[in-house]
Amino acid sequence: MLSNEDIKKRLINNDSLFNFVHVIQQNFDIVPNDKPHIGANIAYQDIKELRNEFINGLYDTIVEWVYSSEKYSELLEHEKSLGKSQAVASSSIIRKAREKFRKSDDPEKLLIQGQLGELLLFHFIQRYMGAIPLLRKMKIATDNKHERFGADAIHYKIDGINNVIVLGEAKTYTSKYKFNDAFSDAINSILTTYANLHKELGLYSHEDFLDKDLDEIAECFLNNTLENPYVELVSIVIYNENKSISVTNQDDIHKQIEDIIKSRFKDFDNAKIDVDKNPILKRITYIVFPVWALDELAKEFQTMI
C-alpha cells in the first residue's frame, strides 16, 4: 500500500496554472456551512483578465491528466525506441493525449466544455485536497469496450488513519446564467455517483485505467478490507456569469468577483441540500467558478485541442 510520502511525491506541481487563477477559501452561506468551500475565477493582472494565459496553462497540463508520471515515462521510452528524439517522442505523447478529447467536425458545436471542467476538477482536487488520481477517466472515454459514465474524478489520499476516496463531479454550463440549475444538478449528480461507486470501481479495477499500485487500494475498498475507509465529495460548478463588474484595479476587480460568488452561494436554496436524507453531503466541498463569456472560452480551448 502507498504511504503518505508516496502520495505527496505523486501530486503534480500545478503552481504555473494557478498563477492565473484567483482563489478564495472560506465558509460560505451554504450547507454544509461548518467547513470551507472554494470560489475561483480567472485572475487579473492590473485591469487585464489573464484569459489567454489561463487557457494556455490549462492546455499544457493535458498530458498529466491523461497519463501518470510512470505511464508517461513508459510511453516516452517506447517512442524513443522507435527512433525518435526526446523532443519528438514527447510531442507524440502530447498528440495522443489531445486525441482523447471529444472532437466535433463543426467548430461552432461545443463538445469540449465538459472535459474542460473535468480537467479543472483534476487540478483543484490535487492542489486543495492533496489527493492523487485513483482512476483515470480519460482513457475510458476513448476505449470503445467501456461505457463512459460515473464520477468525473476518483482520487485517493491518506488523512491520519483514514484511507480517503475523493469523488468529484464537474458541471460546466456555457449557456446563459443558470447557476441555481447547475448547482442543483451538481448535487443530484454526485449523489448518484456516490451510490454507484462500488459498481464503477468494480468495472475498471485490474485494468489499465488504474495505476498498478493503486489497484490494490481499489480492490480492498471493493472487498471491504480497506482499513478506515472514508469518502469525501467535491463538486465544481463552472458557469457563465452575467453580473457586470467595474474595471478599476486588480484588487478591486477580484473583490467584486468574490462578492458575486458569495451572493451565488447565499441565494441558493439550502433546503435543496438535504443532509438528513443524505448525510454524505456533510462531507462535500463546493468549488464555484464564474466565467464571463464562457462559451467563447470553451470554443477557444476546443480550437487548441
Image (cartoon, rainbow, N blue to C red):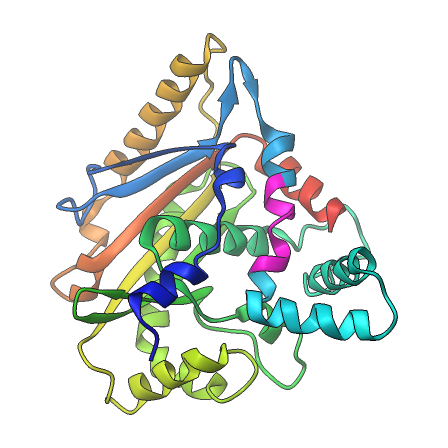
Q: Residue at x 36, y 54 (%)?
A: 235
Residue 189 vertical placement versus 107 (above, below): below
The quadrant in which residue 58 appears is: top right
Q: Where's residue 152, x and y in %? A: 47, 64
Residue 62, magenta (yes or no) = yes
Q: Is residue 220 left or right of residue 141?
A: left
Please, what is the dominant secondary structure of the magenta stretch?
helix
Is residue 285 visible from the viewing direction of this image?
Answer: yes
Name the quadrant containing residue 214. Answer: bottom left
Name the spot of residue 45 as percent of width and height, x first.
52, 18
- Residue 167 visible in the shown view: no
Span of residues in magenta = 57-64
Residue at image point 33% right, 80% down = 1
Q: Is residue 233 magenta?
A: no
Rendered position, 178 above or below 283: above
Residue 76 in percent (x, y) is at: 71, 68
